[in-house]
Image (cartoon, grey):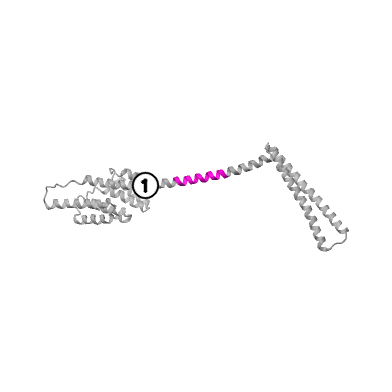
Amino acid sequence: MINLLISCLNRMREVDMKIKQLWEILLVPALGLYLMSCAGSRPKPAGIEEAEKKQKVNEILDLQKTAETDTQRTEEDEVLKLLGITPEEKTEKVTSATSSDTALEQKVAELEEAVNKREQEVEQLRAELRAKENKIVELESILNDLKTVTPEPTTVTTSTAVNKSEFKLRYNDALNEYRNRHYKKAIKLFESLIQLDPNTSLSDNCQYWIGECYYGLGKYEQAIVEFEKVFAFVNSNKEDAAQLKIGLCYLRLNNKKRAKEELERLVMKYPQSEYLPRARRLLKQL
């Protein structure tokens, strides 16, 4: 079938070339006869004679163009006929193809819009997840504080016991200020407690919460400085929590390389830490 179509098309081209050659052959004698008739007739004014010549030439060229157009249409009709397609079906197929292209473009645009919307939803969910993870760390730290703080005997009247009791009360006040997001006020209270007695069992906790306050204020570089001070306290129960927050600070500063190093240090140095699962999740994302 394809070979037949190719053969027909080649044949049509040959016919078209012959027609063009025939027109060229006919056109030259026609022009010659016309010029001879003009020469034998009565002389006319130069302007009129020139205009008539141009008109005759244009008429002959128009006839040639009309013949070429008819030949081209005949070729198209012959091809459609070989394919079994009528002119009406050709028009319907062109219209149908145009409609299909428009529908396809509209469908692609809808899919692109849906993908963009999904990407925005995913990013929003990731942000919410990060916020919840940070909140979990804060709550876990507060819970650990409550577990490690032992109640002071109320019957002891020595000056040392009174100082510890007062320290604990002031510590709880500072912690409440942190929970209420009064970070600047909480920083002052925690710093005053460390100055009052840097050697209590809660002194390292005070230093840790100072770092958390700066983290809450978005001052991540200062928060790193404060969290690193936690390691200066002997037998601190906040070392692993501080190590995790240092990694999170670098992550907030978009320093992924340093964040990865700090989180890996947590995994290696504190294999029994309760923050280990979260550190590993974060490392998978880096």
- Is 44 part of what is drawn in magenta? no
Q: State the image coordinates of residue 15 (x, y, percent, origin top left).
A: 76, 44
Q: Quadrant of the N terminus?
A: top right
Position of residue 9 relative to residue 255, above or below, is: above
> Between 268 and 36, which is closer to the camera in this rendering?
36
- Tell me the residue at 19%/51% (across/down): 169
Q: Is residue 69 visible?
A: yes
Which range of residues does the magenta coloring cover? 102-118
Q: State the image coordinates of residue 208 (x, y, percent, origin top left).
A: 26, 51
Position of residue 167 relative to residue 3, above or below, is: below
- Is 106 part of what is drawn in magenta? yes
Q: Main secondary structure of the magenta part?
A: helix
Q: State the image coordinates of residue 59 (x, y, percent, origin top left).
A: 78, 53
Q: Amino acid at mark 1?
A: Glu
Q: State the image coordinates of residue 273 (x, y, percent, origin top left).
A: 28, 44
Residue identifier under label 1: 128
SS class, disc 1: helix
